[in-house]
Image (cartoon, helix red, strand yellow):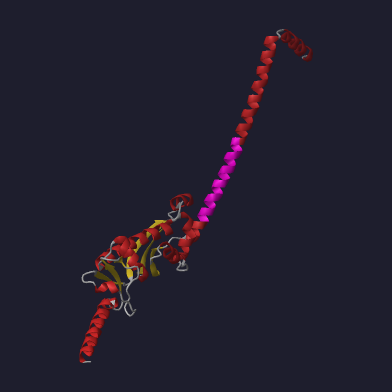
């Protein structure tokens, strides 16, 4: 009986040790996410989260498992965006005044990488340390910056830019989240440094378009008159050419036409 109890006690201890070393979330502190990589199974597709029970048997194999721990802090990025309303310099020249349709603002963006994407990022970009994750976040922030600049400077987005600079649009934030599905909690704050006169811009743009339409109408009318005169001349030349061929073929008609002309004249 004593031998049985000793054996049972040893088995319990061994089971506890196995349970402890197989319980992988012990390695991941609160506020972080772990990525489990083993020599036998590669990168585990499921992230390790603190407080979530996770036990893997191959963690018992010595030197088989490595857990990379990543702290997922909000990413903050500042950028300056400047540009000019579409064809703004042309409209300014047309208006004949010292008008400036350029604009400039600073934007402060903040976002989080989705913790559910950490495993796929680690596998895709071979990210195994916090520094490598920070380098990826810097690259991602630069891509978001490029996208936002192209978004607000697109000619067809003038109305949207006006809403953004009036702090009355969420379309930009929604567009960024749609374009970059690996992030969440995206927010954007603006500091306007130079605000263009949108009302004057739309007014001058309308006048310029009216001017172009009138110019097209005048050009079309002028070209129509020229074309009509050219057609009339061509018909006249064709008629004279036929008369010439007829008189060459029948010279007697010259005398006949002379008689008619003499009969008509007094």
Q: Position of residue 161 (x, y in %)?
A: 45, 61
The magenta segment: 203-223
Residue nearer the viewer, 142 or 228: 142
Number of numbered discs visible in the structure rendering: 0
For the question of whether residue 196 can be seen, the reply is yes
Q: Is residue 44 above or below residue 55?
A: above
Q: Position of residue 42 (x, y in %)?
A: 29, 65
Q: Looking at the image, which is closer to me, 176 or 183?
A: 183
Q: In this rendering, would 108 be left or right of 197?
A: left
Q: Quadrant of the N terminus?
A: bottom left
Specify whether residue 189 is in view: no
Drawn side of residue 214 relative to residue 77, left or right: right
Q: Is residue 247 magenta?
A: no
Q: In the image as oriented, which residue stretches furthest toward the front?
A: 1
Task: Give the residue at x 60% y 32%.
Answer: 226
Q: Is residue 181 above or below residue 233?
A: below
* Residue drawn at 57 percent across, 46 percent down: 213
The image quadrant of residue 17 is bottom left
Q: Quadrant of the C terminus?
A: top right
Name the spot of residue 160 as percent of width and height, x first: 48, 62
**Image: 257 above or below 158:** above
**Residue 239 x/y as whole percent:** 68, 20
Left/right placement of residue 134 relative to residue 239 reads left
Residue 179 located left or right of residue 249: left
Q: Quadrant of residue 225?
A: top right
On whether residue 207 falls in the magenta region, the answer is: yes
Of 247 and 150, the residue lying toward us = 150
């Amino acid at each position: 009986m004593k031998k049985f109890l000793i054996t049972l006690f040893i088995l319990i201890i061994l089971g506890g040790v196995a349970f402890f070393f197989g319980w992988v979330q012990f390695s991941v502190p609160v506020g972080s996410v772990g990525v489990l990589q083993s020599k036998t199974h590669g990168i585990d597709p499921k992230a390790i989260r603190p407080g979530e029970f996770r036990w893997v048997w191959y963690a018992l194999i010595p030197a088989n498992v490595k857990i990379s721990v990543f702290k997922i802090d909000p990413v903050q990025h500042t950028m300056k965006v400047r540009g000019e309303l579409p064809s703004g310099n042309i409209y300014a020249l047309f208006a004949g005044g010292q008008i400036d349709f350029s604009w400039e603002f600073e934007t402060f963006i903040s976002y989080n990488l989705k913790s559910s994407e950490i495993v796929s990022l680690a596998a895709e970009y071979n990210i195994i340390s916090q520094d490598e994750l920070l380098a990826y976040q810097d690259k991602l922030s630069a891509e978001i910056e490029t996208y936002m600049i192209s978004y607000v400077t697109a000619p067809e987005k003038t109305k949207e830019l006006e809403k953004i600079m009036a702090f009355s649009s969420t379309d930009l934030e929604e567009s960024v989240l749609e374009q970059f599905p690996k992030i969440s909690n995206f927010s954007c704050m603006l500091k306007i440094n130079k605000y263009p006169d949108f009302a004057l811009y739309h007014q001058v743009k309308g006048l310029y378009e009216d001017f172009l339409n009138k110019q097209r109408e005048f050009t079309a009318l002028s070209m129509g008159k020229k074309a009509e005169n050219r057609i009339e001349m061509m018909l006249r030349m064709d008629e004279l050419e036929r008369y010439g061929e007829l008189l060459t073929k029948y010279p007697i008609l010259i005398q006949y036409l002379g008689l008619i002309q003499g009969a008509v004249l007094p």
